[in-house]
Image (spheres, rainbow, N blue to C red):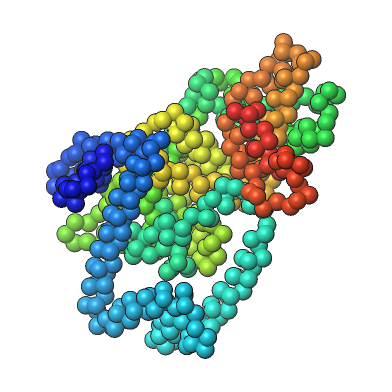
Amino acid sequence: AESGTGGADESPDLLTLCHWIESTSDNTSSGITTNDIGILAETLLDELKQDNQVTAVKVNLIRKKTRERKREIAEERRSKALVGMSAFGRLVGSAAAEKSTLATSANQPISGAPAPSDARSGSMLASMFGLSSFLSSSTQSRASSSAKDSSAETKAKPAWMAEMEAMDDEAFACAVCQEGRTLQPSELLGLYAFIKKVTISSAQGGAKSDIDGTNMLIALPKSLPLALATGEMSNLFRKGKTSADALLGSHALSAMAISSVGSSRNNYYITTVSAGNAIHCSCHTKAKAADRSNPKAPKSEWEGATLRNSRVTCNIILPLVSSKVSEVPLMAVEAALADVNTVVTNTLGTRPKSMLWVVLHDLRLLLLRMAYGEALNSDCGGGSLSSNFLLLLYQMYSADMYAINAEHDESPEVAKHARGLSSGFLAAVEIAQAPGFDRHDSRSKRLEKGIADTAPMASLCSILFFNPGKEISESDVEGNNPSPKRQWEMYKEKFL
């Protein structure tokens, strides 16, 4: 797939041709069908990138050039449209000049220089719309928030969260205005995604009480065997029993009865995939209204969204919430999460009892699909492993957010269950491997079966809640051993 040196600029190589093909899709309005050749080309490029650094660099470079060219075209169209509007014609030209001035002044600060370009453009807008007082207050709030962020950086964060926040702020840009968090920090970005309902019977291992560890936690013995009563293992067993006691006071026993009696009972989950295209929630609302009011070709909400999503089918917008979106209004985040709950409820056909476990089951299914090499783009007609890996990180952040919400508003038992699952799993593994373990007892059989069924979810919860990064105090490190707070690193072999 490597091009020659002589005529590389005249004739495209195989990678470029495959990239052109992966960008094509069906056009139902014109009667054009590609027979999924675009998906096949995308899959071929992803396979060529595996274990081949040279090819991976070339493919990433080709795709990056295409994204940049699309962004340039979108900005040119937007500039032409705004120049034609007499009220804002002057503002567009000044904005472009202001942007270039800001880029140069950021690298060469000058003492005693006038206000930066973003302040000048902000003062221009403030004078036009009478927002001078709001401008000064927002500037002060940004200064105070930056001071808080600098002091909060020393706090330990999960490794997956640090990786997500280390990504470039412009990794996601709005499909309409082509601006991300840097240029629009107060606008909430969302990720176009596609969710579908999955039905798994209890006879096929789909019982929720088996997958989420309810049966395993309740099957833990009343006390830890004396041979295992060490400091760390006693701590793990105590956390597991705390989760079990919380479940015993809730709906756990009824769930166990249903799962044991009705072995053919169906269980419903959702699975989510994404092509990695983002949009501002406000831009989506405006585009939706424009699509419906189009006199020539009116479109429904998700028909227009599919076109903006590179012709990849979508039916939900997942808000990209993180610690870097402090300037986004809380009402906008709540409205976006309410829309997500509505779509999930309509997809499942019933309101879920806990959004935390909805997201955790969704993460588990996505990880299993990746592990078994399923074609994720077969659901919606697009999306690669890289785009769904980004979805995985943001879904983990959503699960952490729902866990905090469950502790305060939803149900403390739900949060205790999720946070204590991995500890109870490790304690159960040690008990089952102990020399005096009686495998013929009915409670012991339930414990062994629960260990096998709960392993994927317990691993996920350990990564999510007990995997801080390197920002740990020296007192937490014992020699060359990992910190006890890094449960996943210490017990990875037992989870796997």
Check the picture and name the quadrant holding the N terminus: top left
Left or right? Give the position of 242 relative to 259.
right
Is residue 137 shown above or below 335? below
Say which quarter of the image contains residue 299: bottom left
In the rendered image, residue 378, in percent from the top left (x then y), is placed at: 33, 35
Q: Is residue 281 visible?
A: no
Quadrant in which residue 291 is drawn: bottom left
Residue 270 horizontal side relative to residue 486, left or right: left
Residue at 55 percent of width and 40 percent of height:
360
From what the image shows, is residue 291 above or below residue 14? below
Name which residue lies at 45% across and 34% down: 370
In the displayed structure, does residue 49 sit left or right of residue 27? Answer: right
**Residue 346: % across, % down:** 43, 43
Q: Residue at x 49, y 83 (%)?
A: 110
Of 366 and 76, nearer the camera is 76
Q: Tell me the residue at 21%/77% (across/down).
A: 84
